[in-house]
Amino acid sequence: MSHKLNQLHAGLIIEEFERNGRDDSDWYVRVWCPETERAELYEYATTRGANANPTAKADCLPSVWQRYALKMQERERAIHAQKLIEKFERQEPHQGAIVEVIKGRKVKKGSRGKVLSVRKPEVAHTSRYGTYQSWVTKALVDFGDSYQYVDIDNMRTIQPAQAELQQIFDLCG
């Protein structure tokens, strides 16, 4: 099997490695596929069955290695861009930010508005059992035709830079 693997993918095997399980081991090769411009993973040997000659050799050409490295860099940039987008979406809204409602019952999903103010948690009341604090942070949002207090967990902040980040993500993705 592995001899055929080396012949079939001559010059395209990027790496070979072993994964050890609890009761067995498997041997894999990562092979560059020129048609799809992607690296594919093949299992070529295992301790769960008989193997004639469980060896493989990484023999990729420098041009294949450069193409693989370029694709990996693009992938890492795409992951970084997605993390930045998620960071911006998780940002707590601030005065003047444009937000979009993503859930809730008072305001229609997809509604967009401008944050006028943010109300932080404050002490709600004191009773004989102790002091209770409101843990909900709400923002007063101007939706054009109305003003509503919206829980910050029910909205996402739309950053001006998000469109640029989405373009970067689309290029890398």
Image: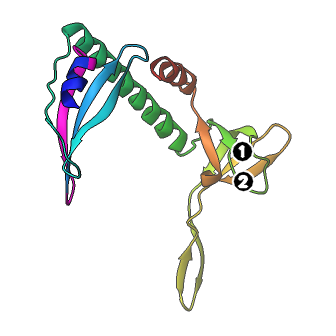
Q: Give the residue type at disc 1.
A: Val
The residue most toward the right is: 145
Q: Can I make out residue 14 in this image?
A: no
Kindly state the secondary structure of the residue where label 2 is placed: strand
Q: Residue at x 78, y 40 (%)?
A: 143
Q: Residue at x 28, y 19 (%)?
A: 8
The residue most toward the top is: 63
Residues at marks 2 and 1 touching, judged by CB atoms closer than 8 Å: yes
Q: Residue at x 68, y 40 (%)?
A: 100
Residue 113: x and y in percent read: 72, 38
Q: Is residue 134 left or right of residue 17?
A: right
Start and end of the magenta stretch?
Answer: 8-23
> Can you identify the residue that label 1 sits on?
141
Tell me which corner region of the image, top left, top right, bottom left or bottom right, holds residue 5: top left
Label 2 Cα neighbours within 10 Å, binned few <14 / some 14-19 / many ≥20:
some
Q: Give the residue type at disc 2.
A: Tyr
Q: Nearer the viewer, residue 52 or 109?
A: 52
CA gap, disc 2 to disc 1? 6 Å
State the quadrant of the N terminus: top left
> Can you identify the residue that label 2 sits on?
149
Q: Nearer the viewer, residue 151 or 140?
A: 151
Residue 27: x and y in percent read: 20, 40
Residue 48: x and y in percent read: 23, 52
